[in-house]
Image (cartoon, rainbow, N blue to C red):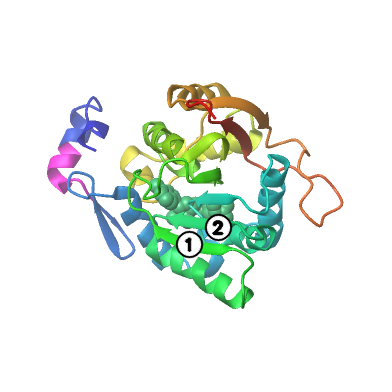
């Protein structure tokens, strides 16, 4: 974490000395030098400040979940698969995916215990007897507590949009161990070829470093950059669903819609099947 500071000049060093790198926000304090999981601290603060499903962002909760499941089905999700929903939030995808996983296994992980509990509550209320196995994991680091080759498909919707590229790379590197050979990872991101991403970038650029990292932030990128780091992590990129094209028909929906974020599909060719 200290490396974040290096090279940012004497002004930042002065702030660091004065504040000892303590960032303040609603009811939690981030210490960039000592905090073991800055992302966790940020997301927990966020979860305590924002009630309900709003914590994972606005938009039509049900429709977005149906679009997410639709992509996974197009990418070959089968009823008996084990699906890892990394950064599962309050259960937007889980509510849709669990009925589709008949005889399979849904695993939801999240860095925020508070958010994870909201997902668990949603699912307990929605399914008296779920058709598949369900696991919830409070995941505090990039070391996924799952066995090698134990996952058929993994997704990360709107998760790498909140971390530095180096951290996305760390998660991608670990993930390839648990996704089986020829298994897929479906991730969304905010490349700057999207107008919406350019707006996010400009809004973030209005604030200084300290302000940006005092809260959960939105990280933009480019398709080339994400493709490159996924490849460096050992994944084989397959294709994109550009976020501004109407290319996803939500399950039970009539019209194809644009997801908003662009979606990259990766496959694990790092080991023989
Ligand atoms: C914008 S929400 C998206 C939730 C969900 N994927 C969906 O599409 O409904 C981002 C979620 O990712 C989680 N998250 C962020 N960074 C994470 C990390 N490093 N490890 C696990 N979860 C993380 C957050 O706590 C939050 O619940």
Tell me which residue sits at (76%, 51%) in the image.
250
Q: Residue furthest toward the left?
A: 17
* Residue annotated with mark 1: 135
Whether residue 143 sits left or right of residue 221 in the image: it is left
Q: The residue tagged with tag 1: helix, strand or loop?
A: strand
Q: Is mark 2 within 8 Å of ligand 1?
A: no
Q: Residue furthest toward the right?
A: 254
Instruction: Identify the mark at residue 111; answer none if there is no mark.
Output: none
Q: Which residues are magenta?
A: 14-22
Answer above or below: position of 23 versus 28.
Answer: above
Residue 86 appears in the picture as rendered = yes
Q: Main structural element of the magenta stretch: helix, strand or loop? A: helix
Residue 182 at x, y percent in the picture: 58, 32
Instruction: Tally the numbered discs.
Output: 2
Q: The residue tagged with tag 2: helix, strand or loop?
A: strand
Mark 2: give few (<14), some (14-19) or many (20+) Cα within 10 Å. many
* Residue annotated with mark 2: 106
**Closer to the camera in the image, 1 or 65:** 65
Residue 51 appears in the picture as rendered = no
Residue 95 at x, y percent in the picture: 63, 64
Tell me whether the residue at label 2 lies in contact with that at label 1, contact meaning CB atoms closer than 8 angstroms.
yes
Whether residue 122 sits left or right of residue 30 in the image: it is right
Magenta-colored stretch includes residue 20: yes
């Amino acid at each position: 974490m200290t490396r974040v500071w290096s090279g940012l000049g004497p002004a930042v060093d002065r702030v660091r000395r004065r504040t000892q790198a303590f960032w303040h926000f609603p009811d939690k304090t981030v210490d960039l030098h000592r905090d073991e999981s800055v992302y966790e601290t940020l997301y927990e603060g966020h979860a305590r400040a924002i009630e309900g499903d709003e914590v994972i962002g606005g938009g039509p909760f049900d429709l977005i979940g149906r679009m997410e499941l639709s992509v996974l089905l197009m990418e070959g999700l089968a009823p008996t698969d084990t699906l890892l929903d990394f950064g599962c939030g309050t259960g937007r995808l889980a509510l849709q995916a669990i009925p589709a996983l008949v005889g399979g296994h849904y695993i939801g992980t999240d860095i925020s215990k508070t958010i994870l509990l909201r997902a668990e509550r949603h699912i307990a209320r929605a399914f008296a007897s779920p058709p598949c196995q369900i696991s919830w994991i409070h995941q505090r680091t990039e070391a996924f507590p799952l066995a090698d080759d134990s996952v058929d498909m993994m997704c990360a919707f709107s998760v790498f949009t909140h971390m530095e590229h180096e951290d996305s790379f760390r998660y991608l590197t670990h993930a390839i161990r648990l996704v089986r050979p020829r298994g897929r990872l479906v991730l969304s991101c905010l490349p700057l070829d999207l107008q919406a991403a350019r707006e996010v970038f400009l809004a973030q650029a209005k604030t200084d470093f300290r302000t940006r990292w005092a809260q959960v932030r939105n990280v933009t990128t480019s398709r080339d950059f994400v493709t490159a780091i996924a490849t460096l992590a050992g994944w084989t990129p397959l294709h994109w669903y550009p976020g501004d094209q109407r290319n996803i028909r939500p399950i039970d929906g009539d019209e194809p819609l644009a997801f908003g974020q662009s979606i990259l599909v990766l496959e694990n060719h790092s080991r023989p099947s």
